């Protein structure tokens, strides 16, 4: 229950900052805008998390707080187990944190606030694609990624 309360607080904090700041661009680490529809802003991620009926599990150091000094170094990745028509859902995991290789067995779709790689083998091995080059975009800023077993979140 504490984790859920912390997650709701983090989403509400992010939404409050978003309302004050307006739409935000999503720059890459190099400072140029990423044009992929599968990489979404933190505001769009917070909106999706607040309105989805998917079953959510949060992992990572702690829920996102946009006022935290290290918030700019975090990437939020949401990856799910079902496509319901063209909509990503089912059971979803939300990772908030820095560089890591995430076990993602059963993932069929994902989105993130920064570019990530999705791989067809465990431990971020095998053939990997990158979210910024999503070949199968889905509504809500998601990308269809069937066969994904791991996700590589790189350092910003």
Image: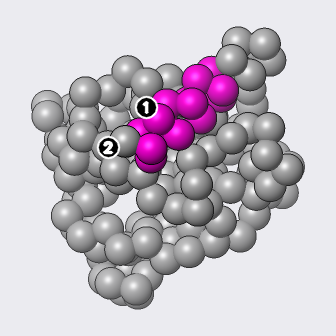
Whole-Å distance between the Cαs marked 1 and 2?
8 Å
In the rendered image, residue 155 lying in the magenta stretch gets the answer: no
In the rendered image, residue 13 lying in the magenta stretch gets the answer: yes
Q: From what the image shows, is residue 84 above or below residue 94?
A: above
- The mark nearer the N terminus, 1 or 2, is 1
Q: In terms of secondary structure, what is the magenta stretch mainly?
A: helix
- Give residue 49's mark: 1
Residue behind mark 2:
56
Left or right of 16, for residue 124:
left
Q: Position of residue 63 (x, y in %)?
A: 57, 47
Task: Report the label total.
Answer: 2
Whether tag 1 and tag 2 are in contact, CB under 8 A, the answer is: yes
Q: From what the image shows, is residue 130 above or below residue 65?
A: below
* Residue drawn 71% across the image and 70% down it: 155
Which span of residues is magenta-colored? 2-15
Q: Position of residue 113 (x, y in %)?
A: 60, 45
Q: Is residue 121 visible?
A: yes
What is the quadrant of residue 40 in the picture? top right
Left or right of 86, for residue 129:
right
């Amino acid at each position: 229950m504490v984790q859920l309360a912390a997650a709701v607080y983090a989403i509400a904090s992010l939404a409050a900052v978003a309302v004050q700041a307006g739409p935000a661009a999503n720059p890459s680490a190099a400072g140029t805008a990423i044009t992929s529809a599968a990489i979404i802003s933190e505001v769009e991620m917070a909106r999706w998390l607040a309105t989805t009926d998917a079953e959510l599990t949060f992992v990572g150091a702690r829920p996102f707080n946009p006022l935290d000094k290290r918030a700019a170094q975090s990437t939020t990745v949401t990856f799910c187990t079902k496509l319901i028509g063209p909509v990503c859902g089912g059971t979803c995991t939300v990772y908030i944190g820095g560089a890591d290789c995430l076990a993602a067995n059963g993932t069929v779709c994902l989105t993130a606030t920064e570019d990530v790689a999705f791989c067809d083998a465990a431990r971020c091995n095998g053939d990997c694609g990158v979210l910024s080059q999503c070949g199968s975009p889905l509504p809500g800023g998601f990308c269809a990624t069937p066969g994904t077993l791991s996700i590589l979140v790189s350092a910003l």
